[in-house]
Image: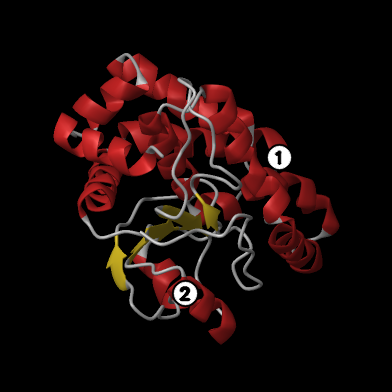
Amino acid sequence: MTDAPTELLRLASADNFRDVAGTGPGLPTGDGGRVRRGVFYRSNELQLTHEDARSLAGLGIRAIHDLRSSPEIEAHPDVDVPGATWRHAEVTGVPMETVASLHDVDAAHRVMHEVYVAFVRSEAARASYAGLLIELATGAVPQLFHCTAGKDRTGWAAALLLEIAGVERDTILADYLLTNEVSSTTREKYLALVAEHLGPELVAVYEPTMVVEESYLQAGYAAAETDYGSVAGYLRAGLGLGEDVLGELRARLRA
């Protein structure tokens, strides 16, 4: 493991890049501990400048897990980060064909809730998340995982890690919502494109798909609790993770 910067490393070309553990001493756990920084990182797509790629290399990142679909990757392939091995771990995100047909805000919220429920109920998504967590538990660290915006597929993975670390739910939610703050520039850019190409009246319709909201994360939690009794049940029965994997993740995450 490498020494992590005390404060959040900001990348000009990946504005939702951050340490899963937060900043400063790391996010607090429910029993008075802290999440260890410099172990796992999360991000939006890695369309990196040379300077930002060097910054990630300087963190010693050993593996990059790309949760995007093949068409997303083909359109915007990750920039190579020296020293890091790239791995494809596809999870289905917001269906673009569905987004393109949205005409009202309520429909946009329904789509986002369905995405988070699918993280729990889709067999393919469960297999991908299981594979990701196993790699995070067994591979050399530090490691990074990301999707396109770094908010939904990535946000769910980060929430699971913090659950495993023993972080309280309110703290996990606050960290999840931080995406809206740190990635505001990217969001505004895409909403400006919506206004330009589709019309300003559709900005409000598309905005729910470009932010995170408490109800989205809660939809995933509710599905896990309905289907498996708890997030812990989802991790064990839904993802098939044994205590060896969960214990190793906990050990890596806990300061």
Q: How many marks?
A: 2
Question: Where the C terminus falls, by quadrant?
Answer: top left
23 on left or right of 167: right
Q: Position of residue 204 (x, y in %)?
A: 78, 46
**Residue 27 shows up from this direction:** yes
Q: Amino acid at mark 1?
A: Asp
The residue closer to the viewer here, 121 or 16, is 16
Q: Amino acid at mark 2?
A: Gly
Q: Are marks 2 and 1 in contact (CB under 8 Å)?
A: no
* Mark 2, other Cα within 10 Å: few <14 / some 14–19 / many ≥20: few
For the rendered model, the colour scheme is secondary structure
The residue closer to the viewer here, 95 or 187, is 187
Kindly identify the residue that appears in the image at 29 percent across and 38 percent down: 251
Q: Position of residue 190 (x, y in %)?
A: 70, 63
Residue 138 versus residue 74 in the image, above or below: above
Kindly identify the residue that appears in the image at 28 percent across and 66 percent down: 87
Q: Which residue is mark 2?
A: 58
Residue 67 sits in quarter: bottom left
Q: Which residue is mark 1?
A: 104
Q: Which mark is residue 197?
A: none
Kindly identify the residue that appears in the image at 73 percent across and 55 percent down: 184
Q: Position of residue 246 (x, y in %)?
A: 24, 34
Please tell me whether mark 1 sits on a helix, a strand or a loop: loop
